[in-house]
Image (cartoon, rainbow, N blue to C red):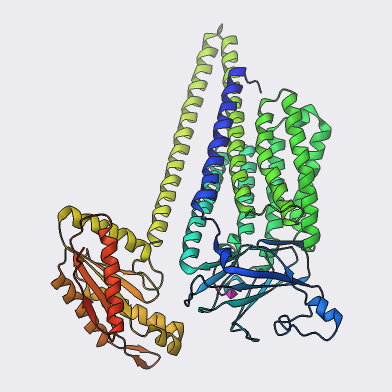
Amino acid sequence: MLINRQEVRNYDLYLFVITVVAVSIFAFVALSVVPERTTNSRVSQLAFINDPEGRLTFETVLDKTANNAADKAQKTWTPAVSPVNLGMSSDVHWFSFVVTPDKSRAVRYLFEIDYALLDNVDVAVYPPLASSPVVRYQAGDNLAFNVRPIANNTPLFSLPLSAKPQTVVVRVESSGTIRMPIAVWEEKEFIEYAASQNLALGLFFGFLCAMVISNIFLFFTTKNRSFLFYTGYALSLGLTLASLQGLGYAYLWPEQAWLQGKAVLIFGNATILFAVLFSRHLLPIAEFSPVVDKISKVAAWAFGACIFTSTILPYPFAIKLYLVMLSIIVFVAMFTGGWLSFKGVPIARYFSVAWLFLLLSGFIVSLDSVNIINLGISTSYLLIIAGTVETVILALILAINYSHSYDELISTQAFALEQEKQASKAKEDLLEVQQRYQDDLEYKVEERTLELEITLRELSEVNQELERLTAIDPLTGINNRRHFDKKLKSEGRRSRREHTPLSIAVIDVDHFKRINDKYGHAGGDACLIHITGIMQSMLLRLSDDLCRIGGEEFALILPNTDSEGALHVVEAIRERIENSPLMFEGEAIHLTISAGLTTSIITDEEHAEALLRLADEQLYAAKESGRNKVLFKPFSG
């Protein structure tokens, strides 16, 4: 392939721009959109015990008495700082830490282990000075995904409601790396964090899906195997990162615990296999060195064999074998790219840059996973950024190669036509062939463009549906707090613009905790659904908006409604609920609500929020004055 200097400079510029843009976008998402984990401030006294014989139990691990020196030594807790990385070990490890609430109030926290590849995780939570846990949980890759107490890609547990410090003891047993990045969240914090993280992961996996779909279409239309190998590489890379994140276990194979234990190895080997096949097909390795070509062929066979052997070999041995082979292929790939670039192969330089990003980042993450180095940050985004840059650069290499192959074909045709100028009939025939070829090529280009437009439109529709679902409360089916905040701001601006009254009501179910304690969460959920249905049936205007803004707390936005009309609506709702008991498991549950109500014409941006605070204050006043009532107070500014 011959490329002139001007084209080389242009491609260098493209490479630089693509690299900077890709790194900037995903670095911005990783460092800015995804919130920093400041949740470790609630965790103290973190320590661990290595229990190689597995003798300790939850009944004995916190017992400070010991019969002999050996038992005392075994129960010696080693202080640690999160994230704890103990490297690869098959020993049982015990972790203990204290969760201290931010304030002296009962708050429900979520405890997360931000590492998805632990085999067995047992959690026990102890109140102060207690010898028995108040709650026990199980999670891990060796259990079916639906066994987890909370359906999350990483182990996530709900701590009991308490205003006092609680001791959490975790028993971890895994055949791979023992990592314990601990985070303790309030529920709202975790929802915000999960939404931001899902945005970053959605950008990356959406990008990979687009590349897979477009390149498989290109393969079927051009029959060029480079597109097939590139598709296999992008798909395997996505599955590897999905396995590392626990997303594959959550959404693709939730019942296949054995596959989750092997997925990283299977798809990791497949990623390198397709990368080697892609490189051998794209670069003229055999022309310059048959020896290097044979090495690459052996590497392809080796990684292909490891896909199957990783399903039967012990995980510690298989992962170490993979890391050794990965280390070797890093240097072979970099050497091959640099050597071919020195030999005058233009695309080899871009090949080297592409592999420099992914292979070195993968190598660094591998060293971190076996505790040779400790990055101290999440390695997921390092792999995502490197994978994105490499995928884009490889796509650029494909485009360059395909473009110049086409240019060489056109040049060959032009030369043939020049040689046949003396024969007019042959010239006309060749021109006719060329015209048919160009028409066919234009048709294929238009066809692929249409297919890509359809794909992008479908992706846009999916994104719109996802945006709609994020505004819906999954239990009651009404709008959630996120929608409420947007709606309140919107209706506040309309009230200010049109100078019309805006009424806000905050509604809370009376004695809901007693209902939960007596009938369980199923009964509590049934009550919330029952009350939601009644309130929805009482709202006759499309502009009236009912939202669930808390556990048993609702908010009602009544645009263009004065105080008299709003009080009539809310009082009617209260009476209807009081007179409509819920039949649950053959027993009537009598329900009442308390509500705070206020009305005003919005005059500035902060006015709507102040209106909400006043309604909330009236709600608490209604509760303190006996419940089952509606209190109204006009907004005085």
Note whether residue 213 is visible: no
Q: Residue 149 in magenta?
A: yes
In the image, what residue occupies the spot 18% across and 75% down?
567
Q: Is residue 227 above or below residue 528?
A: above
In the image, what residue occupies the spot 60% across and 70% down?
145
Q: Is residue 515 above or below residue 332?
A: below
Q: Position of residue 157 (x, y in %)?
A: 57, 73
Q: Position of residue 239 (x, y in %)?
A: 62, 54
In the image, what residue occupies the spot 75% across and 23% down?
343
Q: Nearer the viewer, residue 587 or 67?
A: 67
Q: Position of residue 458 (x, y in %)?
A: 42, 50
Q: Is residue 107 above or below residue 294?
A: below
- Toward which corner of the image does residue 611 lie, by quadrant? bottom left
Q: Position of residue 417 (x, y in %)?
A: 56, 13
Q: Is residue 112 above or below residue 378?
A: below
Q: Is residue 239 left or right of residue 444?
A: right
Q: Residue furthest bottom?
A: 587
